[in-house]
Image (spheres, rainbow, N blue to C red):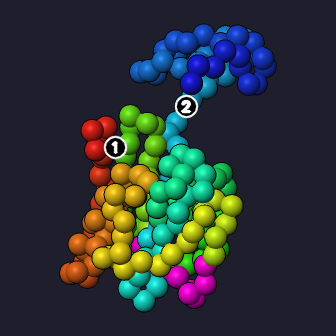
Amino acid sequence: MNIKYCPMCGSAVIHEIPEDDDRLRHVCHNCGNIQYQNPKMVVGCIPEWEGRILFCLRDIEPQKGKWTLPAGFMENNETAAAGAARETWEESRARIRIVAPYRVYDLPFVNQVYFMFRAQMTEPFFQTTPESAEVRLMREEDVPWNEIAFPVIRETLKSYFEDRKTGHFEFLNLELPPERI
């Protein structure tokens, strides 16, 4: 993002490397404010009920009309787990209990980090929302693999189904290169 004016004082900013730094920043020489641009954190989960996974058919862009797990941008003043639970509620009206962290995916080429949790639904209730045209519990054999919205979700699901066969769910931090996205 190209910032032209300081959000603190309104003066024009300069794109330069500040003293004792190692990368370009937007620097205000009037008030000294430095604008740091950081990656967006996406939080979500794999909600399970009696061996089936809760999927949402996106009713918003990007990837409208494709299936996904409940996930979205983390908000200020919430934990990653609370964000995953909130996103699940917003997209499906399902209530969950976080079981454990499952995957962190670094996507530096799009300035995002995905943090996915394993979760159990606390009851078999869910419904459509303004964000999801359809919400459905699916078994592994029912997953529409060619209609999954995001590669990170596809990778998470493939790993999860493999891990579920052994009952061993390792928490991993992975980087997805651009060619896998």
Quarter of the figure with the N terminus: top right
Residue at image coords 55%, 12%: 15
Query: Label 1: how many residues lie within 10 Å, few (<14), some (14-19) or many (20+)?
Result: few
- From this viewpoint, which residue is outermost toward the left? 166
Q: Is residue 80 visible?
A: no
Q: Earlier in the sequence, mark 2 or mark 1?
A: 2
Question: In the figure, 170 relative to 111: above or below?
Answer: below
**Whether residue 22 is situated above or below residue 56 in the rendered picture:** above
- The correct choice, above or below, for 8 with respect to 80 in the image is above
Residue nearest the viewer, comparing 97 with 177: 177
Q: Position of residue 62 (x, y in %)?
A: 53, 46
The residue segment tinted magenta is 118-126
Camera-side residue of 142 and 68: 142
Horizontal side of 163 relative to 138 (left or right) equals left
Amino acid carrying mark 1 in the image: Ile
For the residues labelled 2 and 1, the Cα–Cα distance comes to 22 Å
Give the residue pinned by disc 2. 37
Residue topped by disc 1: 181
- The picture quadrant where one finds residue 125 is bottom right
Is residue 8 rendered magenta in the image?
no
Give the mark count: 2
Front: mark 2 or 1: 1
- The type of residue carrying mark 2 is Gln
